[in-house]
Image: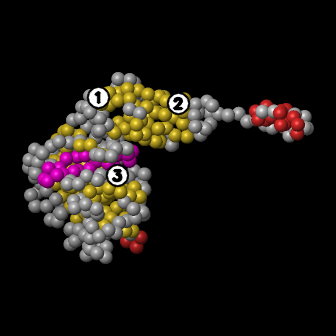
Amino acid sequence: MPDSLTKRLSPALLTFALILSPGCDQKVVTGVDNTPPEVAIDGLPAGSTVSGVAFRVDVTATDDEGVDRVEFLVDGVNPVVDSTPPFSATIVTLAQVSGTEVVISADAFDAAGNTSRASTTVEVAPRNETRLTTDLNDDMNPAWSPDGERIAFQADRSGAQFDLWVMDADGSAQVRLTENVNEDRNPAWSPDGAYLAFDSDRAGEFDIWMLPLATGEADAAALTFGNNEDIQPSWTPGGSHVIFASSRGSNGDFNIWRMPATGDDVTTTQLTAFLEDDTAPAVAPNGTLLAFASLLNFTTEHIYTNEIGELQVFPLSGDVGFTELDPAWSPDGSVIVFSRSEGLDSNLWIMPPGALVPVQVTFASGTVGDGAPAWSPDGSRIAFHSDRDGNLDIYVIE
């Protein structure tokens, strides 16, 4: 094409001329994907009543080029993202006022950035708090079975020491699992439902023990040994490791440690190494985040989170004058529920996604108050212990 002609053409016409001009290389114009995905919220029609704790949202999303992700929002904010079909999310409603209407939206994105939205308006049901145990002695530290059908807990119903018990999720069929003159505490259910990890001083110092539920206490075995205190076990999501608090560090303070569930002490890893006590570890459902309680930056214990293996930690709240304990992740990993006290009274609080301040969930009073929250696997209930009616018993919010 002559230079004199190219100088007189606009950039757009020049491009078109170059494509069609004889003697020039032919250009292939590829198609651009402008078609948004199709998305629909399944089984949640407008006007539905949903749990005042949390509920599951399932979405059908399709696209010719594939759906990249679905973002779930409540009233248009704080998205929860799922990048793997079938697309779903657990929507936590603890921060919502009972009886209010909220808009649940699902935004589907394809790889080209096209998006489409499906929405529905639901009503948040009033929350109910149900007492599950009524024994005259203390029942504490509930733990859900992976199928959500049972709850394990510790109880001193003998009046002498704590033993492990289990009951159905409605409080029925309460069965004693251990009977030992020493203390058995802090049960934690393995993800496959086969074992309870717990701490016990039945061998002297507190160690982590394993109770096989199929065969019972006769086959209970110690996972840790030594002259240290190993307490408060929890499991990694896949069940390959147990996380616990231990005084085995060089300074004698409690830090968080990780051990293979097989008890291979050689590969036990120290996860925190602060000069203050770190306790109550909880691993997020994604397996990469850790929450724990520590005196790290405040005069009272607060909840901290960090990426496992990283030194940098973040306080869940910066509020002073409170003690924060017992962190527990929601099943989708977006929310932590914990106990918070100012003086003697303790209640349950949460930190909603994207929030700067926590939200109070329970408003009971008692010498101890509410503590040790544990989410049900489907996210719709939280078990906890409380002395709101006298001695410590197990309750459920739903």
Count of marks overlaid on the render: 3
Q: Determine the residue positioned at 20% across, 72% down.
A: 204
SS of the residue under disc 2: strand
220 horizontally vs 6: left or right: left
Q: Quadrant of the N terminus?
A: top right
Q: CA distance from mark 1 to mark 2?
A: 26 Å
What numbered label is drawn on residue 100?
1
Q: Determine the residue positioned at 76% across, 33% down.
A: 12
Q: Determine the residue positioned at 22% across, 71% down.
A: 205
Q: Residues within 10 Å of mark 1 (few under 14, many from 20)?
A: few
Q: CA distance from mark 1 to mark 3?
A: 37 Å
Under mark 2, the amino acid is Ser
Magenta range is: 329-349
Q: Return the x and y of residue 361 as percentages of the image width and height.
A: 23, 42
Q: Quadrant of the C terminus?
A: top left
Residue 340 among those drawn in magenta: yes
Q: CA distance from mark 3 to mark 2?
A: 40 Å
Displayed quadrant of residue 42: top left
Q: Return the x and y of residue 136 as percentages of the image width and height.
A: 8, 49
Q: Which residue was labeled with disc 3?
A: 193
What numbered label is drawn on residue 2?
none
What numbered label is drawn on residue 116?
2
Q: Residues within 10 Å of mark 3 (few under 14, many from 20)?
A: some
